[in-house]
Amino acid sequence: AMAGVDEEDLATKSSIGRTQKDYTKFLKKEDLKGKRIGIEKSFLNGHEGVVGLYQSAINKLKELGAEIIEISLLAEMRSIGNASTIVLQTEFKEGVNAYLAKANAKVKTLTEVIAFNKANSTSAMPYFKQETLEASDKAADLNSQIYKDAVAKTVSSQKIINDLMEKNKLDVIVGTSFGIPSLIDLFNGDYSSGFYFASPAAMAGFPHITVPMGFINELPVGLSFIASAYQEPVVLSTAFIYEQATKHRKAPKFIKNSNFSSGV
C-alpha cells in the first residue's frame, strides 16, 4: 500500500499532513465495543447463499461488541446515475493517451490501440470484443461540460456518505463487497450481480477495504468496510478485528470446474 502525494495527480495534494507513515499500528486484536457500524440493508435480500454469509457477518460484528444500525447507502447513491461511467470513460481515455504519448510503443493513442486490436482480432480478442475501449474513445474531453457536470455529480457521493455517517453517528459502513461469485464463462462473459460496494467509496475518494466473508461452493465472497475521508485507521482496525475473529481466508485452489451456477 502507498500513501502520499503524486505530483501528476492533483487530487492527492489534499492528503498532505493527513496520512500516516505506518498503518500497521492500527491492526490490533481487540473487540468492537463502542463502535457503531452501519450495515447496507439492501444486501439482506437476494441470493440466499450470499445473504446467509452477510447475516452471519453481522452477527459476528454484534458478538464482537458493535452496535448495528441498518442504513440505505445504495438507494441514496442512485441519484448519481451514470455520471461515474462518464467520468471513468473520459479519464480513462485521457490517461491512456497521455501515457502512450510518452511510452516507447508503436501505438500512441487509444484510437490506435483499438485499430491494432481489430487488425489482430484473432489473437488479441479471441473471445470478446473491446466495447469498453470503444465507448471510452468516444467520450468527451476533460474540458467538456458533460464531463464537468458528471464530476460534480460524482463528487456529491462524498456528501451522501458523510451525511449518512453523521446522521447515524457511524464509525464505518459495511456491506457485501460483490454478489454471487462469477465463474469464467467464455460464452456469456462475466456475470454481474448488479452491485459492487466499492463503488460509493471509489466515487467519493474515501477509504475502502474488503476481507473474506465466506465461500459459496469454494468461491469467495467478501465483506466491505468504508468510511469518510482519511478514516483509514478506523476502517483498517475494524476490518482487521473482524478478519481475525473469523479467519475465513483460504488459499486459492484454482478449481477447474464448479457445480455452482452464478446465474441462479
Image: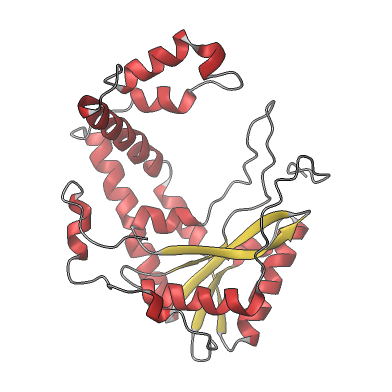
For the N terminus, which image quadrant?
Answer: bottom left
Expressed as whole percent of the image width and height from the top left, the position of residue 136 reads: 37, 28
| Whether residue 220 is situated above or below residue 242 in the rendered picture | above
| Whether residue 264 is situated above or below residue 113 in the rendered picture | below
The quarter holding residue 145 reads top left
For the C terminus, which image quadrant?
Answer: top right
Point 39% across, 54% down: residue: 202
Q: How many marks do you count on the picture?
A: 0
Furthest-right residue in this view: 259
Coloring basis for residues: secondary structure
The quarter holding residue 77 reads bottom left
Left or right: 51 in relation to 259? left
Expressed as whole percent of the image width and height from the top left, the position of residue 211 reads: 56, 65
Point 36% across, 62% down: residue: 206
Point 53% across, 69% down: residue: 174
Left or right: 7 in relation to 116? left
Left or right: 151 in relation to 234? left
Front residue of this view, candidates 30 and 196: 30
Expressed as whole percent of the image width and height from the top left, the position of residue 246 reads: 66, 75
Front residue of this view, candidates 218 and 69: 218
Furthest-top residue in this view: 119
| Whether residue 190 is situated above or below residue 23 in the rendered picture | above
| Whether residue 155 is situated above or below residue 16 in the rendered picture | above
Point 56% across, 85% down: residue: 66
Left or right: 95 in relation to 247? left
The quarter holding residue 110 reads top left
Front residue of this view, candidates 75 and 170: 170
Expressed as whole percent of the image width and height from the top left, the position of residue 167 reads: 40, 77
